[in-house]
Image (cartoon, helix red, strand yellow):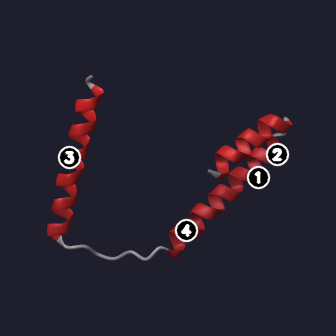
Amino acid sequence: MILVVSLIGALGLHSSLFFFSGLVLAIACNLWAWKRAKLVPISKESAARATTANWFVTGIIVLFGLN
C-alpha cells in the first residue's frame, strides 16, 4: 500500500524522489514486520489439512476461470 501511494504521489508531483522514499519506507516496514513475527510450529495433520484446503480453493478458482 505504501508503494502504491508513493507511486501515485510521485506521478502527481513529477518527483522520483517521492517514489524512492516510499520504496525505502515499504522495505523498512516489511523488514520490521518480519522481525517481530513469532513463528510457531504446526502439526503434520494441520499442514495436511491446509494443503487439502489450498488445492480445493485452487480448483474452485480454476473452475470459475474457465467460464
Secondary structure type for disc 4: helix
Residue at the location (38% across, 74% down)? 39
The circle drawn on residue 33 is: 4
**Residue tagged 1:** 21
Residue at the location (16% across, 61% down)? 48
Instruction: Tell me if mark 2 has few (under 14), some (14-19) or many (20+) residues whose alpha carbon lies within 10 angstroms of its own.
Output: few
Instruction: Tell me if mark 1 has few (under 14), some (14-19) or many (20+) residues whose alpha carbon lies within 10 angstroms of its own.
Output: few
Q: CA distance from mark 1 to mark 2?
A: 6 Å
Q: Are marks 4 and 1 in contact (CB under 8 Å)?
A: no
Q: CA distance from mark 4 to mark 3?
A: 28 Å
Q: Given the image, on which type of amino acid does mark 1 rest? A: Ser
Q: Are marks 4 and 2 in contact (CB under 8 Å)?
A: no
Percent across and percent down for residue 37 are 47, 73
Q: CA distance from mark 4 to mark 1?
A: 18 Å
Label 3 or label 1, whichever lies nearer to me, is 3
**Residue tagged 3:** 55
Q: Are marks 1 and 2 in contact (CB under 8 Å)?
A: yes
Residue at the location (16% across, 69% down)? 44
